[in-house]
């Protein structure tokens, strides 16, 4: 009973303006539902704040930041289709964003030496400099967001989320091996 009261107090302390996705949870919901909603609420809140800061300080968007971050991790550039998979967006979205960033001089299209029909996209010197400024601020923003949590809590949270990730990947592998459609949790017909 003390845990339930503590959780209720935590949610109440957020107030109506900040409750967000966690407001969907009810006292009698399964703990798994409450965990999922809390994770979603935290992720959404962090993402909203990062989006707001990117817009205010750099007049840019989170997708543009993510795009530049991927290219920063791959100095030799990436094929457009690979970049699309890394960003988990359609090729059309990557093409449109690439066109904008090329116009701004932040990225360049280069011939792919392994496939003459393909382009690779890489950061220009200007793009690398711009992204370095954004990345430094992004890191500072995240540090500020998590500043109030003790290091031991952050370490424990990181470890527990890592365990959750491993569990989820294993669960997905089991579903795939069983031929289960994870969206409906039913067996797929044999091919």
Image: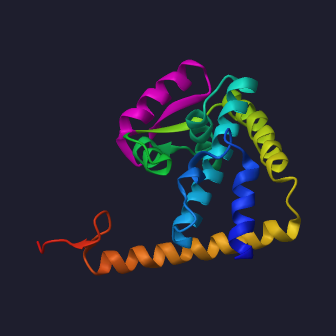
Location of residue 139 in the rendering, given as x and y in whole percent from the top left corner: 79, 46
Q: How is the image coloured?
A: rainbow
Residue that extends furthest to the top in the rendered view of this protein: 103
Name the residue rendered at 41%, 34% in the picture. 93
Where residue 181 sits, quadrant-wise, is: bottom left
Q: Left or right of 25: which side holds 92?
A: left
How many numbered markers are drawn?
0
- The reply to whether the magenta stretch includes residue 93 is yes
For the view shown, which residue lies furthest in the left direction?
191
Q: Position of residue 169 (x, y in %)?
A: 48, 73
Residue at 69 percent across and 55 percent down: it is 11
| Nearer-the-camera pick, 108 or 132 | 132
Q: Is residue 36 magenta?
A: no
Q: Give the magenta part as a residue range.
A: 91-118
Taking 127 as reference, is 27 above or below it?
below
119 left or right, relative to 30: left
Along the horizontal axis of the image, is 90 left or right of 133?
left
Residue 92 appears at what percent x and percent y?
Answer: 36, 33
Q: Position of residue 71 (x, y in %)?
A: 59, 43
Closer to the camera in the image, 184 or 29: 29
Q: Is residue 83 above or below residue 9?
A: above
Q: Is residue 26 above or below residue 20?
A: below
**With respect to residue 60, does 72 lie above or below?**
below
Question: In the rendered image, which quarter contains the C terminus?
Answer: bottom left
Residue 127, quarter of picture: top right
Tell me the quadrant of the picture where the N terminus can be found. bottom right
């Amino acid at each position: 009973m003390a845990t339930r009261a503590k959780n209720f107090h935590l949610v109440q302390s957020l107030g109506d303006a900040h409750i967000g996705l966690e407001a969907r949870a009810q006292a009698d919901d399964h703990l798994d539902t409450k965990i999922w909603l809390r994770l979603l609420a935290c992720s959404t809140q962090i993402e909203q704040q990062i989006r707001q800061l990117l817009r205010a300080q750099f007049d840019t968007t989170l997708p543009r930041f993510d795009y530049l971050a991927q290219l920063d991790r791959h100095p030799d550039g990436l094929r457009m289709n690979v970049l699309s998979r890394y960003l988990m967006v359609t090729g059309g979205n990557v093409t449109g964003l690439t066109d904008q960033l090329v116009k701004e001089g932040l990225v360049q299209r280069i011939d792919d030496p392994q496939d003459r029909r393909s382009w690779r996209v890489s950061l220009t010197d200007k793009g690398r400099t711009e992204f370095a400024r954004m990345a430094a601020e992004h890191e500072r923003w995240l540090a500020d967001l998590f500043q109030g949590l003790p290091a031991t809590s952050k370490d424990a949270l990181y470890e527990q989320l890592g365990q959750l990730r491993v569990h989820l990947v294993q669960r997905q592998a089991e579903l795939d091996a069983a031929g289960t459609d994870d969206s409906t949790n039913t067996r797929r017909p044999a091919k």
